[in-house]
Image (spheres, rainbow, N blue to C red):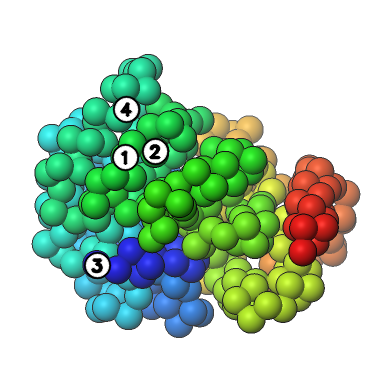
Amino acid sequence: MDAKKLSGIFTPNMVPLDDRGEIDETELRRLVDWLIEQGISGLYPNGSTGEFLRFSFEERKRIVRIVLEQTAGRVPVLAGAAEANLRMTLQACEYYHSLGAAAVAIVAPFYYKLSSEAVYAYFAEIARNTPVNVTLYNIPQFANDIPNAVLKRLCGYERIVGIKDSSRDFPRFMNMMHGIRPLRPDFVFLTGCEETLLPTLLMGADGGTIATSGVVPEVVMRLYNHFRRGELDAAREIQFKLLSLIEVLVFGADFPEGVRQALILRGFRMGAGRQPLSPLQQLDLDAVRKVLRCLLSDYGFTEPPAGGCDPLAARFRSADLERIVREVLQQLNERQ
């Protein structure tokens, strides 16, 4: 497989559930079709947004099978294969390879705190035995970290073709690309931090796995396509406007409940999540839904809520996010 097939915007899709909390296959297929019709570059089932840990191993395999069947080769699929142990991870690799996945994404071992050498040994063993290409998934908030020094060693394995980094550490991401690209020019770098999607693209990233693209794929793809055409002012405007939506989707409620509510507002039958919610959380979700309706109505995707929209109702950190993005873009302009 050409690793560059992994470039662009990959959507970490959620999984619709029916009234019994089971996978709603019909609605999942409809969601897949809709995302592809809106122009997304690829799909990423069994990611964090897809709540992979809330499904059984057999359910995760079924989700990937459904997604691959429905894509029917229209876009590549990066299948999440983050299992709890090496044996199950390799079983997932073999199964997703047999289905036709372009690659798999695998996190470092989680729960037990491991040394960097143990993290290297884990991925090296996978690289020697997997039949499918592997994208490393670095999310140190929830799993063992993949240090840049370990990544340099792992990039020597042909089967390891890239990394998705969700550390939210932009300087580290730049150092990672700077250190690996001379050793492996074809190595794929995907960001999982959508607040700085445009800056990472400008610094040479190949794309990202962007949760917001599962809710407003038209908007995120517009940003990406403006970037590819060199229309940076237009791309920058979209990046800034997305910050408020990103803040609510990711931080407005216990993740990924904000994404679920936004998809319901966009017309999908998502059902209730498998994680129980307290009465207080339900009240918070009511507020989140109102803010989401306001934000989506600003794009023309929904009607505003009764009573209108209060711009002060949202608890955003947009000013901080805008400052970060502006500083990065200013530094890039100064280097040109």
Look at the image and tell me whether residue 42 can be seen: yes
Element marked by disc 4: helix
* Numbered badge on residue 119: 4
Front-most of residues 180 and 303? 180
Q: Residue at x 81, y 50 (%)?
A: 327
Label 1 neighbourhood size at 10 Å, few (<14), some (14-19), many (20+)? many
Q: Residue at x 60, y 72 (%)?
A: 224
Q: Quadrant of the C terminus?
A: bottom right
Look at label 1 and name its amino acid: Leu
Which residue is labeled 2 in the image?
A: 151
Instruction: Check if mark 2's residue and mark 3's residue have beta carbons within 8 Å.
Output: no
Which residue is labeled 1 in the image?
A: 154
* Mark toward the viewer: 4 or 1: 1
Q: Residue at x 32, y 22 (%)?
A: 117
Which residue is labeled 3 in the image?
A: 1
| Mark pair 3, 1: CA separation | 18 Å
